[in-house]
Image (tube, grey):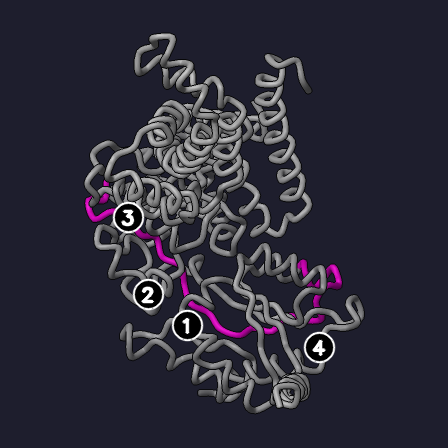
Amino acid sequence: MFLILLGSTLSACASSNPEVLRVATTTSTYDSGLLDAIIPEFEQEYAVEVEIVAVGTGQAIALGERGDTDVILVHAREREDAFVAQGYGTQRFAVMYNDFILVGPVADPAGIQGLPLATEALKQIAVKEASFASRGDDSGTHTRELELWAAAGIMPEAAADWYSALGQGMGATLQFAQESGAYTISDRGTFLALEEGLGDLEIMVGGQSIDRNTDPALRNSYGVIPVNPERHGDTASRLAAQFVDWITSPAVQSEIEEFGRERFGQPLFYPDSQAWRESGR
Amino acid sequence: MTPFLEIILLTLRVSGIALACATVLGVPLGALLGLTQFRARPFLVGLVYTGMGLPPVVVGLAVYLSLSRSGPLGELGWLFTPAAMILAQTIIALPLIIGISMTAVDAIDPAVRLQLRSLGTSRSQEIFGMLLEARVGVLASVVAGFGGIISEVGAAMLVGGNIEAKTRILSTAIVLETRRGNFGFGLALGGVLLSLAFSVNYLLMRLEGGRRGRI
């Protein structure tokens, strides 16, 4: 009796094994809850199981380079283009965007509240040597922060007292800023999601919502790239292509736009795919 | 000084100081628990054994909340400094050192104790004598404590913040390099961590073995 039960359980497990698509993405898309909200639909429609590996952009790209994932969904444009140019990925597709904001302690020791451009604010912070917390982890957000410093003509040193390169995720970095009264750059979604526990911080540059963000350099675009099947034969290339078609389709794009609106009073991500733009919505 | 060397030195400094603190506190406490009988003893021993299995990240969380600006010890300003990491690592190593040195002292033949007493030793001399007798086990406790903290990453990340050139140690650097996708460098750092741990353990063993003319 027991053997029959065991046998039937095993065969049931083995036969109901659906195809698996692995998506490596950044913590910001995962922690916001967006993927959990939309992915089940894809899994049902295509009878596929999606495994999400939520890591830093750097690691997501490395996973793609090694063929350990089928698709990457990240936000560091230059590195995405390099990923495709080096033949690791087939093509980059725009998916969505949101924006970065510069947050800091309510007391605002550098006096940057309401400045229109992040580079101006960073200059002020450097001049006043006000505490600044950097992700320092080669993530998409960290990459952007370094671009902004470079644009401001400043090269902050890790050894400087006021500059802390943490090498940690966005949540931990915001927590650090809250605790030590530091400024930092965050994606708006993560800040909104964690705002309740960050009472000592407020938005300094970037405005209260994305349409009030006056700095185009703070725009944060997410792209999806199928990993090149020629480089890594066993990646599920058909599923990856289906995933790209699906996530860029106008129907899913409008779901992305709806996500978070109820809870935060504004979307966390805005649709940006070509299909969406052509649909003229 | 290269950042790499800096990370190694900070790792040794933090874990070294933590180990010293935990040893100074833990060995006498372990000896006391191993050598005395009192009503609360089973309770305390149970606590120590539980502490030996305590997930380091829980210790980290508790230390973090205590040192947080809104926590009871916030005014110390220790959060995200090496001091916070030393505190957390001391707490992690302490139960290991107490527990193992307690067992070591406990395992010594009671006749040795009677012999020490018959020599008219004072209470502290007696405890010291027993510790000397149990030195192999006591050393093992220190080695276990060291192993528990040198490679620990959760608490160090939480209370230290993994700040470059300030609180970044080998274990947190490995996590960072992994997240950055620099798997090779992460692995190399792992190798450094291992050889560091080996060197310290070998040194400790030599220290003990030298006196016996072994190893």
Give the numbered dot on residue A33. 1
Give the numbered dot on residue A193. 2
Amino acid type at image mark 2: Ala
Could you tell me how far apart the alpha carbons at marks 4 and 3 are, in whole angstroms? 43 Å
Count every numbered label the image shows and give the total.
4
Residue A151 in view (yes/no): no
Residue drawn at (37%, 19%) of the image: B127
**Which of the two discs, 4 and 3, labels the residue nearer the N terminus?**
3
| Along the line of sight, the residue nearer the viewer: B100 or A71 | B100
Residue drawn at (34%, 8%) of the image: B120
* Residue A56 position within the rendered picture, expressed as x and y whole percent measured from the top left: 53, 57
| Along the line of sight, the residue nearer the viewer: A48 or A225 | A48
The answer to whether A47 is drawn above or below residue B25 in the figure is: below
Could you tell me how far apart the alpha carbons at marks 4 and 1 are, in whole angstroms? 25 Å
Q: Are marks 1 and 2 in contact (CB under 8 Å)?
A: yes
Residue at mark 4: chain: A
Residue at mark 3: chain: A
Residue that numbered label 4 is attached to: A236
Residue drawn at (47%, 55%) of the image: A141
Magenta residues span: A82-109
Do marks 1 and 2 share a chain?
yes
Do marks 3 and 2 share a chain?
yes
**Which of the two discs, 3 and 2, labels the residue nearer the N terminus?**
3
The answer to whether A240 is drawn above or below residue B104 in the figure is: below
Residue that numbered label 3 is attached to: A178
Does the magenta run of residues contain A36?
A: no
